[in-house]
Image (tube, rainbow, N blue to C red):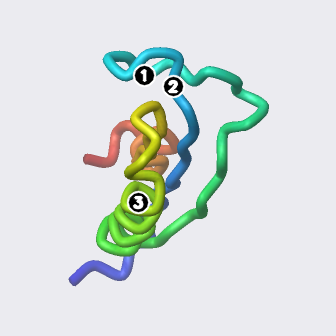
């Protein structure tokens, strides 16, 4: 296992259209948290997704921020 920190960010909110990825109101996008591993981020994402299952427009995403910070590291 690598000791290198990999930053994953979980965000979410209501989408304009259930078929798209554009948020209804960017000022209401929720920052769930920043996580050092994909597994930690996935657990947070899953908890938020399950908590909002009754809202068809709510979506949460895992952003692989480490790839944005250092695109050459794959």
Front: mark 3 or 2: 2
Q: Mark 3 = which residue?
A: 45
Instruction: For marks 1 and 3, give the CA distance.
Output: 16 Å
In the orientation shown, which residue stands out farthest toward the right?
Answer: 27
Measured as percent of width and height from the top left, residue 2 is found at 27, 79
10 Å neighbourhood of mark 1: few (<14), some, or many (≥20)?
A: some
Which residue is pictured at 38% across the width and 51% down the height? Answer: 53
Measured as percent of width and height from the top left, residue 72 is found at 34, 39
10 Å neighbourhood of mark 3: few (<14), some, or many (≥20)?
A: many
Instruction: For marks 1 and 2, give the CA distance.
Output: 6 Å
Q: Is residue 25 left or right of residue 67?
A: right
Which mark, residue 50? Answer: none
Q: Is residue 20 left or right of residue 34?
A: left
Q: Mark 2 = which residue?
A: 15
- Whether residue 68 is situated above or below residue 48 in the rendered picture: above
SS for tag 3? helix
First of labels 1, 3 by sequence position: 1
The quarter of the picture where residue 19 lies is top left
Q: Quadrant of the N terminus?
A: bottom left
Front: mark 1 or 2: 2
Measured as percent of width and height from the top left, residue 13 is found at 57, 39
- Whether residue 56 is situated above or below residue 11 in the rendered picture: above
- Whether residue 58 is situated above or below residue 10 in the rendered picture: above
First of labels 3, 2 by sequence position: 2
Measured as percent of width and height from the top left, residue 40 is found at 39, 74
Viewer-proximal residue among 57 and 3 = 57
Q: Are marks 3 and 2 in contact (CB under 8 Å)?
A: no
Q: Are marks 1 and 3 in contact (CB under 8 Å)?
A: no
SS for tag 1? loop
Q: Mark 1 = which residue?
A: 21
Which residue is pictured at 48% across the width and 39% down the height? Answer: 58
């Amino acid at each position: 296992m690598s000791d290198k920190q990999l930053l994953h960010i979980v965000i979410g909110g209501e989408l304009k259209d259930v078929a798209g990825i554009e948020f209804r109101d960017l000022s209401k996008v929720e920052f769930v948290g920043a996580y050092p591993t994909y597994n930690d981020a996935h657990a947070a994402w899953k908890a938020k997704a399950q908590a909002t299952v009754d809202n068809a427009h709510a979506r949460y995403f895992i952003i692989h921020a480490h790839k944005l910070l250092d695109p050459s590291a794959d």
